[in-house]
Image: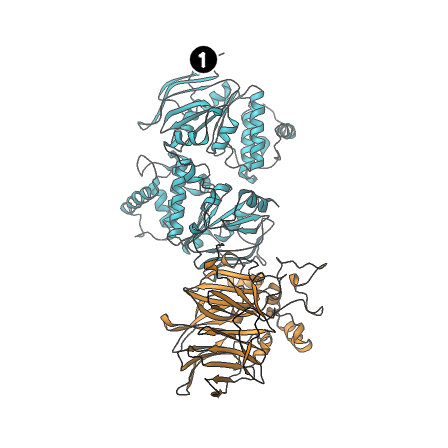
Amino acid sequence: MSPIIEMQKVTKAYRGVPAIRDIDFVLERQEIHALVGENGAGKSTLTKVMAGVVEATSGRMLYRGREVAYASPFEALSDGIAMVFQETSLVPSMTVAQNIYLGSEKFLNRLRGVNVAAQQFLQSLNFTVSPTAPVASLGAAKRQMVEIARAVHHKAEVIIFDEPTAALTPEEKRYFFALMKRLKASGVSVVFISHTLEEALSEADRITILRDGEKVAEGKASDFTRDEVVHAMVGRTLSGEIYKTRRSLAQIRKPGAKVLSVQDISMGNAVRNNSFSIFKGQITGIFGLVGSGRTETFKIITGIYKRDFLRGGDIKLDGRPVRYNVPAEAVKDRVIYVTEDRKSEGFFETMSIAENFYSGLLAAGLERSHIIDFAEMRELAADWSKRLNVKAINENARVIELSGGNQQKVVIGKGLIQKPRLVIFDEPTRGVDVGAIAEIHQFINKLADDGLAVVVISSYLPEVMNLSDRILVFRQGRVVEEIPPVEATQEKIMYAAVH
Amino acid sequence: MILDPILDLFRGKAVTIPPMDGTLRPNNLLEEADVRLAVEAPDNLAATAGKVVFSSGGQVLELGKRKNAKPRIIAAFDSAVSALAVSEAGLLAVGLDAGSIEILGPGKARRHIDGFGCPVAITFAGEHDVFVCDGSRQHRPANWAMDLMEKNALGSVWHLSLSSGERKCLAQGLAFPFGIVMDPGAGRLIVSEAWRHRLVAIPAGGGEPLPVLTQLPGYPARLSPRRDGYLLSLFAPRNRLIEFILSEDDYRADMMREIDPRYWIAPSLSSSRSFLEPLQCGGVRTMGIHKPWSPSRSCGLVVELDAELQPVASYHSRANGTRHGVTSAILHEASILAASRGGDAILSLRPSSEVARP
């Protein structure tokens, strides 16, 4: 039997620069196939060609042995190829049920019927999402679930997932992989892009590894080891560099002066009487499960959210009480929050790299003149692109055209341009490839070495353990444990986060 | 926001306390420390030329070389000793609860200096200059809790010249200055201001106090030098109940008028010795068990500070412990000696630099 998808010598070039080159790719029927590679390796481009989001510049694609060239995702979906994007493409103002049935509505619809059908459908997938909830009110994990449900609902024979597990909790991931196996058993073929190599190795039948737009390896997942995959991805062994298990006492930075003192801050049920301190010259790692109030706490500190009006607690920056009503006030005090949701909160996607960097400068009021200085913008972009190793055609490239890792670097640079004294990184390496993770980690370490107070919020335990000089564990809206890195184990941190 | 001060009137002031985290993260090092000497209410420790002296009640004693060796009485007074310092040449300065300072020289030489209301900390600079913390103009050292409950800031720091007999006020309006140490490199004095939970730097010639370490989670007591920094003892923790009482003027006035000071809701040097004590959260046993994570009116806490006066390590006795009310700690022969006034013991600790721990 012929493979369900076969791609032959496929090339896709943007402005003459090839994102993928002469790629041969085969997806067998009822197969789970993992696509791995660094950011910018061409994984998303390859899958976008499959799903009709972009057209290949050259090469052939066969679907069920028949040559196809999709002009739009709708054509591909009609043929049975669905793609679940990394950044969800749901309509936020519509309900979950409406989103699932979007595009497949009948001429006359009864809302109650749609809701009931959606409820049954979601239950069959074991997803605990209310069909009547507006998508805008859902968190990242639940949005991902709706996106998956929509793809499954369209009875696609090939489902392509771009970073499906980045926003999911460990428990949700287990559900997701069980679902993927159920899909496979029901005859569906799955392609998934993942930066978590353990997932690719344990869940996929076969793996294809891309590097710099070319295929460098392909084979059965069971034939690869983790180090082999990493080596093929980056051309060097980064495994030990990134995932050192534990830091020694000598590696831990001594704390400087207390920069931030958070005392009993509260915000409804999300943050409850939370108290902790952040010190200069140290990386404070924050770990907690989704819903533990980590992001909310730091959004209160930086003026994005408001603490309780009555007795909402105290926040002291260098001993001075502060209550930021808008983030701009925090930026003026050189407190920077680097968001976890880079696409909607981190950058202006239609603007260039240079304009994004410059917007950071404008927000802090650090620009040289009151009118836009293009020379300063160019200097800034060249300087920060070099410092952060942003890989792009030039500084005029739009941020949306960059890979996830490079987008993240732009978001980080945009914050650091504001000369912060306290930097809060929320999931700094979510959806970022292994090579860029190492670079971002190095950069975060350098900030702490330079004497800045640094906070890293992460759901990935090895990252927290590897980066932090002290680890704070959040549960139910407050810090429940402080664990020195020399004593930290994954089990100990997880135990504190759960019990 | 410009309206915040007005909105704060409606929002109500939150009673908050800085958390004990980072280098102040609780441990049991003070509780598990060796007892160098079990003695009733040891207070101020001082060391010179291999000799350690301390005060207990109305006596100044010399600590024996061996563990639990009987201490030698150096001097005895009618009044309780409230402060103690020793110069390199062995000159002893003793502050008394009655309000005077006695300078004891070699042999029987003795000099009496009057005019202090509340001498609670003394330090020498050479053999002829003495700096004194006068905790309060209003109360004697034994009545420190009353000074806190009245929210006084009537303390001052003085320079005494032993050669000329002159005295000069270096700073006043301090909220119970309880510890003093010389920072010779910078020509300044570091003073702990207990009721404002901070350390301030005062120029040795006098001048405005400059806060150098603020937002301490307890009431700082005496300071002493150590290698590349200082040792600070905190005699009691801050807790929200006491902070609340301090914000309730009428209640506090009634409490002070009607209740025996031993049972006030105020910081304490020890806990759980009487069922008449006010409820103090973790300080109360429930079914025979203390809750060490709960706040208490008393605790034991010694903090190592670096040369920039930032905490680098700490030693705790928590709510379920007994080595509370540490009013003084010094470095002596590679050990830290801490006087637990509430725990009736002088404790010996290994400094953090010699212990491989976070």
Q: Residue A285 at x, y = what percent?
A: 48, 48
Between residue B116 and residue A104, name the one nearer to us: B116
Q: In the rendered view, would you say A6 is above or below B150?
A: above
Q: Residues within 10 Å of mark 1 (few under 14, many from 20)?
A: few
Q: Residue A186 at x, y = what percent?
A: 58, 20
Residue at the image position 44 percent from the left and 54 percent from the top: A330
- Badge 1 element: strand
Q: Residue B116 at x, y = what percent?
A: 51, 84
- Where residue B106 sits, quadrant-wise, is bottom left
Q: Which residue is mark 1?
A: A66
Q: In the rendered view, would you say A98 is above or below B295?
A: above
Between residue B88 and residue A399, name the one nearer to us: B88
- Where residue A348 sits, quadrant-wise, is top left
From where the camera sits, is residue A308 visible?
Answer: yes
Chain to which mark 1 belongs: A
Question: What colouring method underlies this structural image?
Answer: by chain
Chain in orange colour: B
Chain in cyan colour: A
* Number of numbered discs on residues: 1
Q: Residue A402 at x, y = what percent?
A: 38, 35
